Amino acid sequence: MLVLSTVSMLFIGFSVISAILLFFSHFSCSEYKGSLYPRLSGMTLLLGLASIQLMHLLYSVDLFETMNSRFYVMLLFIVAPTFYFFSNHLLKFETHYQHRHLLHFLPLLLSSFVPEEYLYPWALLASFILGSLYVATIAYNLYQLRSQRRRFKLEFLGLSVLFVIAVVVVLLGFSIPLISSEFFFKFYALLIGIAFFIAQGILLRTPSITTEVQEAAKAAYAESTLKQVDTESALRALEKIVVDDKLYANEELNLSMLAEQLDLSTHQLSELINTRLDKSFSRYIRELRVEEARKMLINEPKASVLSVGMSVGFTTQSNFYAAFKEIAGIAPGQYRKENRMTVSST
């Protein structure tokens, strides 16, 4: 129990710091521009999980009786639906019926009237029963993406592990009457911390994972929009505009801009790239930019690494470094150093 206590305390701290960083960085990026409900659900989920972890911390140092706390139970009824909303947005690209979202928070309202003697374990157990229903729905949506997993194997594995953690959390909730409250809260804190660790790892490896999974999900669910499109001609036009004319170097390039130049809808272009090139639009552009950056790093030794990144279309140093390391496997400076040594030795 001492080891569990120590590890859970470390993961509590990591969770709270990660939640703060993600709140102010990930959900302010361009991927969520115009996506009010996904952004709100994601940010609320982070705040809810961080608050739960802080309550676990107070419980661990005997400053708060978490198991009898109405606020703790209400947090669980907040986390369950927001986890569902955000996952549903990520996996299914569903944006309809937002006006019905409030119905999902009816249990939250009811929990504020539950007599205190029923908070533990029955109200807690009810929150995990509700969570199990959400997890089952998310599992089905994740299963529907199986045909797309070859495109981002490690990221898909990470998402699957996050789902497994959600399942374990549900099972842990069902075991409340059978285990000690101390073990429950510390193990729950550990699971939340592991989930944050995996999420951070996925975002570091693939910063645009949200967009990529959305595009993959759309390709998996949607009926083809290319029935009336000459895909071979469209692919040739795409290569000429983006590759030959180096449109990828335009830092303002986006899906709608390129679709307009190809006389396609954004849905058609997205499906074309996803199904014929087996990658997302954002991945396609990043690969072209990194490939050009590789050449420039070797052929223009006097150019700074940052100037190379800016010239191929990246808008910030962090985006360039993250994309280059994701695709090339090493940092751009290290790539230049290693290849310069290779050239000089030959």
Image (cartoon, rainbow, N blue to C red):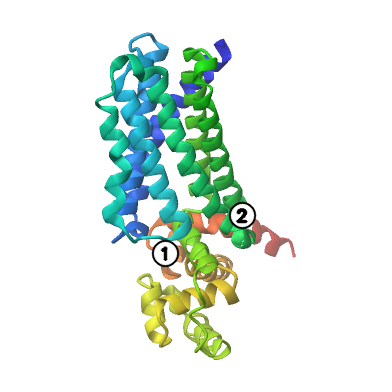
Q: Is residue 69 left or right of residue 271?
A: left
Could you tell which of marks 2 and 1 lies nearer the N-terminus? 1
Q: Amino acid at mark 2?
A: Gly
Image quarter for residue 16?
Answer: top left
In the rendered view, would you say 109 is above or below 25? above
Find residue 253 and report its horizontal and vertical position in percent. 38, 73
- Which residue is at the far right? 346
Q: Is residue 318 left or right of residue 99?
A: right
Q: Nearer the viewer, residue 162 or 333?
A: 162
Q: Nearer the viewer, residue 115 or 222?
A: 115
Q: Is residue 77 left or right of residue 330?
A: left
Mark 2 element type: loop
Mark 1 element type: loop
Spatial separation of the CA atoms under disc 2 and disc 1: 18 Å
Find residue 291 and report its horizontal and vertical position in percent. 57, 69
Query: Quick one: quadrant of the C terminus?
Result: bottom right
Rendered residue at 50%/17% (across/down): 177
Number of numbered discs overlaid on the protein picture = 2
Q: Nearer the viewer, residue 10 or 85?
A: 85
Find residue 174 and report its horizontal and vertical position in percent. 51, 26
Give the residue number, with chain letter if any, for mark 1: 314
Residue 302 can be seen in this image: no
Give the residue number, with chain letter if any, for mark 2: 329
Q: Amino acid at mark 1?
A: Phe
In the rendered view, would you say 201 is above or below 286? above
